[in-house]
């Protein structure tokens, strides 16, 4: 068998225990929740909605920063059908800042559902959760901060 044979056997034995870092199986099973078919949500790093309040799928991945930098979440602009899932994720992950990298409409095409209230005195209610939102800045991108969340 030799060293090479042992290494090969060791690697083959590990395969069932190591997630495929390029798997897209869950993405493919949830096409109705994906805004774009060519922007893949990777199974290996996806955010799993484990609050027991519906599907565990959201098109969102954890992105690891450099050492000493927080991990962040990158997600698609919510669709009308996924806005509640978006807020479930915000609540579950205790997100305190949301940075929007697109406009609701670009070049006449809808890129994102408006998932925040028109007025900062309004609340967002989803799945029994109330999130108070403060609009922090308005520029090319919008920046919101979750001020408080109540069950």
Image (cartoon, grey):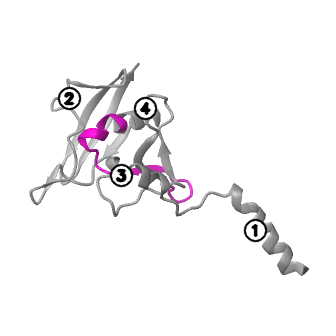
Sequence-wise, the earlier of marks 2 and 3 is: 3
Residues at marks 2 and 1, CA–CA distance in whole angstroms: 54 Å
Sequence-wise, the earlier of marks 1 and 3 is: 1
Q: Nearer the viewer, mark 2 or mark 4?
A: 4
> Which residue is drawn at the image coordinates 39% and 36% (left, top)?
90
Sequence-wise, the earlier of marks 3 and 4 is: 3
Residue 123: x and y in percent read: 25, 24
123 or 141, which lies in front? 123
Q: Residues within 10 Å of mark 3 (few under 14, many from 20)?
A: few
Q: Which residues are the magenta region?
A: 63-85
Residues at marks 4 and 1, CA–CA distance in whole angstroms: 37 Å
Left or right: 16 in relation to 61: right
Residue 54 bears which disc, if any?
4
Q: Is residue 70 visible?
A: no
Sequence-wise, the earlier of marks 2 and 1 is: 1
Q: Which residue is mark 3?
A: 31
Q: Residues within 10 Å of mark 2 (few under 14, many from 20)?
A: few
Q: Is 130 within the magenta?
A: no
Sequence-wise, the earlier of marks 4 and 1 is: 1
**Which element carries disc 1, helix, strand or loop?**
helix
Q: Which residue is mark 2?
A: 120
Residues at marks 3 and 4, CA–CA distance in whole angstroms: 16 Å
63 or 126, which lies in front? 126
Q: Which residue is mark 1?
A: 11
Q: Is residue 138 visible?
A: yes
């Amino acid at each position: 068998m030799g060293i090479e044979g042992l290494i090969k056997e060791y690697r083959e034995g590990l395969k069932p225990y190591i997630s495929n870092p390029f798997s897209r199986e869950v993405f493919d099973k949830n096409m109705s929740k994906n805004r774009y078919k060519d922007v893949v949500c990777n199974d290996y790093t996806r955010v799993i909605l484990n609050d027991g309040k519906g599907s565990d799928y959201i098109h969102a991945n954890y992105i690891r920063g450099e050492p000493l930098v927080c991990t962040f979440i990158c997600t698609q602009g919510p669709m009308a059908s996924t806005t509640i899932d978006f807020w479930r994720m915000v609540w579950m992950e205790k997100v305190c800042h949301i940075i929007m990298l697109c406009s609701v409409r670009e070049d006449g095409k809808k890129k994102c559902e408006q998932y925040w209230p028109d007025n900062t005195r309004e609340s967002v209610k989803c799945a029994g959760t109330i999130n108070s939102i403060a609009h922090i800045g308005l520029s090319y991108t919008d920046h919101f901060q979750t001020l408080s969340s109540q069950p």
